Amino acid sequence: MDVAPDRVGDRPHRGDDADRGERRRHRGPLLEADEQDEQRHDDDPAADSEERTEEPGDEADEYERHGRIVRAVSALTRLAEAPDRAAILLDVDGTLAPIVQRPDEAAVPEEARRELGRLVERYALVACVSGRTGEDARRLVGVDGVRYVGSHGLELAPEADRWRDEIHRFASTVDWPVEDKGLTVSFHYREAENEDDALEYLEEVAERARTAGLVPRFGRKVLEIRPPVQADKGTAVTQLLEEAGLKRALYAGDDTTDLDAFRALDGLELGVRVAVSSDEAPDELVSAADIVVDSPAELLALLQRL
Ligand SMILES: [Mg+2]
C-alpha cells in the first residue's frame, strides 16, 4: 500500500481543473481525520520515538511522508471502528477482478468473494458499482448481500429506462456487431481489420446518434451509445449513501469513470478514495486518491484490515 503523493497531506493537490482543486481544498473527510490524528499523536508517547536522524531536507520529506501515511491509516481505522455507519463501495473489473484480455473471462478470486461476505456481515452497506449491467456484475461477483449497480450508475436513474427502446431501435440501424448492455449499447472495434475505416464508420454512427438525441461516447476501442441522462458512478454513490443514510465511505476503483465516484465522497464526514494502480491507470485517478494499491490482490489485503 502506498499513500498518494500530494493528496492526504497536501492540499491543494496538483492536476485537475481549478474548480475541482477548489472543492478539494474545502472538503472535509481527511481534514477531520487529521485533527483527530494529531490529538492521538499528542497522547501517544510512541509517536515521538520516530527517527529524526536524516539531513534537514530529507527529514522534512520523511516527516511529511510519515504524516500522510498516518492520516491514511487513521482514516481506515476510523472507518473500521464504526462499520455500522459506513459503506464499502467497489468497482468490479480491474478492482476486484484482475483485468483479462476478454471481459467475459474475468473472475473474482474466491478469497476476494469470501472477504466480501465478511464485509457484508460487518458494514452497513457493501456495493459494487460497475460499467457492466448490475445483473452481470452480480453473476461475476456472486456474493449475497452485496448491492449491485450497473451501467455506470444509469440503473439508478429512472428516466434512463425510457430510452431503452429508442437505443435498441437505433442500434438496429447500425451495420456493426453490437454489445447490448440494456440501457446502453457498445460497438467495439479492437478486432476490426482496418481500424481507420472502422473509426470513420463509427464516427458517422456517433453523429447520427447525436442527431437522434442520444449521447455517443468513445472509450478504449469502443463507441458507446448512452441515453441523454445525467448519471455516472458519482451520482450512483451519492444515491446509495443517501438511501442508506450513511456519511462514511470507502470507494475503490481503477479507471477514469471511478473519478466521479471519488468526487461523490467530497464533503462526507469520512471518505477514503482508493486507486488500484496499473500501467493503464489514468494519472488523474492516482493523484486524486488517498491511498494507492498496486493490484486487486493488494486491495484485498487492505479490505481484510477493515
Ligand atoms: Mg474498473
Image (cartoon, rainbow, N blue to C red):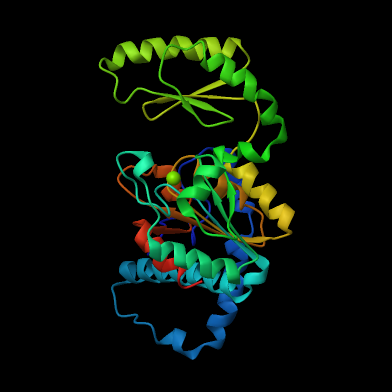
The tally of labels here is: 0
Left or right of 164 on screen, residue 296: left
The x, y position of residue 148, in whole percent, is: 58, 49
Q: In this orientation, which residue lies closer to the viewer: 208 or 235?
A: 208
Image-quadrant location for residue 5:
bottom left
Query: Residue at horizontal 38%, vertical 30%?
Result: 220
Left or right of 42 on screen, residue 302: left
The x, y position of residue 68, in whole percent, is: 45, 66
Left or right of 155 on screen, residue 17: left
Instruction: Name the quarter where the N terminus is drawn.
Output: bottom left
Query: Residue at horizontal 42%, vertical 63%?
Result: 112
In the image, ligand 1 is in what quadrant? top left
Query: Residue at horizontal 46%, vertical 84%?
Result: 47
Residue at the limit of the structure toward the left, as seen here: 193
Res 186 seen here: yes
Q: In this orientation, which residue lies closer to the viewer: 228 or 275?
A: 228
Query: Residue at horizontal 39%, vertical 48%?
Result: 94
The x, y position of residue 269, in whole percent, is: 67, 62
Q: Is the residue 76 above or below the residue 262 in the image?
A: below
Res 68 seen here: no
Q: Is the residue 188 above or below the residue 107 in the image?
A: above
Q: Is the residue 137 above or below the residue 28 in the image?
A: above
The x, y position of residue 243, in whole percent, is: 73, 53
